[in-house]
Amino acid sequence: MGINRLQKLRSLITEHGLDALLVSQPENCRYLSGFTGSGWLLISDNHALLATDFRYVEQAREEASDFEVIRVKGELNSWLPELVSDMGWHELGFEANYVSFSSYRKLSEAIKAKELNLELIPTTGLVERLRSIKDPEELELIGKAVELTDAAFEQAKSIICPGIAEKEAVWELEKYLRQHGSEEVPFEIIVASGPNSALPHAKPTERIICSSEPVLIDMGARISGYCSDFSRTLCLGEADKNFREIYDIVLRAQSAAIQGIEAGMSAAQADELARTIIEQTGYGNAFGHGLGHGVGLAVHESPTLTSNSSDLLVDGMVFTVEPGIYIAGWGGVRIEDVVTLEKGKARVLTRSGKEWRALHA
């Protein structure tokens, strides 16, 4: 598995005219090496190095068997230039979205001071491009995370009732996920009720959940590093005409996107499938985020399904489909599933139903 990923990356390194690539983004490091600690990878045609400090050396040797582990001390500028020079590399790529400007400046100054024949070349998305297409082992782990989230939602329907506070409901859900096998949850769980559900990234509060109002739940699990992402919106008690109308629109938009998404389609075209339906009903301005995002070692990764995305959807990708409508002062509705592109079509991994009625009146 690791060797195959390295081979694919080495082809990209060659395509970009680089001698080697410095990988520092944590999920990218884990994807390529299996290492879950703090460190850097240096990858060339003939070398796969893992540089880390004394805290992680033994862990690195256990987790990253395909890599030569090097113990280093201090910031990048104190050891990287001479190491790269000793390897005979002159064109070193680095992840521009992750190396800070301060680190880049210190590296450049160290290279200049030592009069080394070394050029730092910014790159973006090389490893992320590989990560966007999942292999069978990754799909299995994501599937397990999704399955656990489905189970947590069944628990949610028995927990969330009029009189419980949002924060209390969140704690019960996180406790369930952790007790049933999840590692640290990928993001702060959302239980947002009434007007709070109009905030797509609402923070749980002490607000008491009441009957006949929207309750938006957004949560995920993490299994062996791989994430799930899930949203449902419930109504405890009788729903008014406004809720039923908005819920139906969001559900139709999501269904149209899932049924219409095809391999070879641009992410922007996928977004349009749902957005058109919401816009036609007059709620276009209330759907302010994209249709979805990739899911894997990070809960937000490539591809990005937005109206201005240039990403191309291909078989093996895993991403969310999550249209929503949010009305300030009233509330919001979002329905989110994880899907994978398989044989040219979207296959839904999430199994939970989409009935808005809760168990409690």
Image (spheres, rainbow, N blue to C red):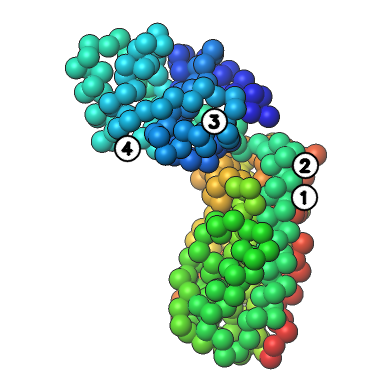
Dot placed on the residue nearer the N-terminal end, 2 or 4: 4
Q: Which residue, given by chain and number where applicable, does mark 3 sit on?
A: 61
Q: Which residue is mark 4?
A: 100
- Mark 2, other Cα within 10 Å: few <14 / some 14–19 / many ≥20: some
Indicate whether 320 appears above or below 336: above
Image height check: is 317 above or below 273? Answer: above
Amino acid type of disc 1? Arg
Please tell me which residue lies in front, 130 or 116.
Answer: 116
| Nearest to N terminus: mark 3 or mark 1 | 3
Is 39 on the left or on the right of 7, as rendered?
Answer: left
Q: Which residue is mark 1?
A: 347
SS under mark 2: strand
Other-residue count near label 1 (Cα within 10 Å), few / some / many at <14 / 14–19 / ≥20: some
Q: Nearer the viewer, residue 224 or 18?
A: 224
Which residue is found at the position 26% from the left and 18% from the top?
Answer: 111
Circle nearer the N terminus (1, 2): 2
Q: CA distance from mark 4 to mark 1?
A: 38 Å
On screen, residue 85 versus residue 40, left or right, reads: left
Q: Are marks 4 and 1 in contact (CB under 8 Å)?
A: no
Nearer mark to the viewer, of 3 and 1:
3
Give how far across and how far down residue 187 sits, in percent.
Answer: 52, 59
The mark that comes first in sequence, 4 or 1, is: 4
User: Which numbered disc, 4 or 1, marks the residue closer to the eye?
Assistant: 4
Distance of mark 3 from mark 1, alpha carbons? 38 Å
**What residue would you read off at disc 2?**
342
| Mark closer to the chain start, 3 or 2 | 3
The quarter of the image holding the C terminus is: bottom right
Q: Residue furthest left?
A: 113
Q: Specify the quadrant of the image occupied by residue 99.
A: top left
Please name which of the two marks, 3 or 4, marks the residue nearer to the observer.
Answer: 3
Element assignment for label 3: helix
Residue 27 in picture, x, y percent from top left: 52, 40
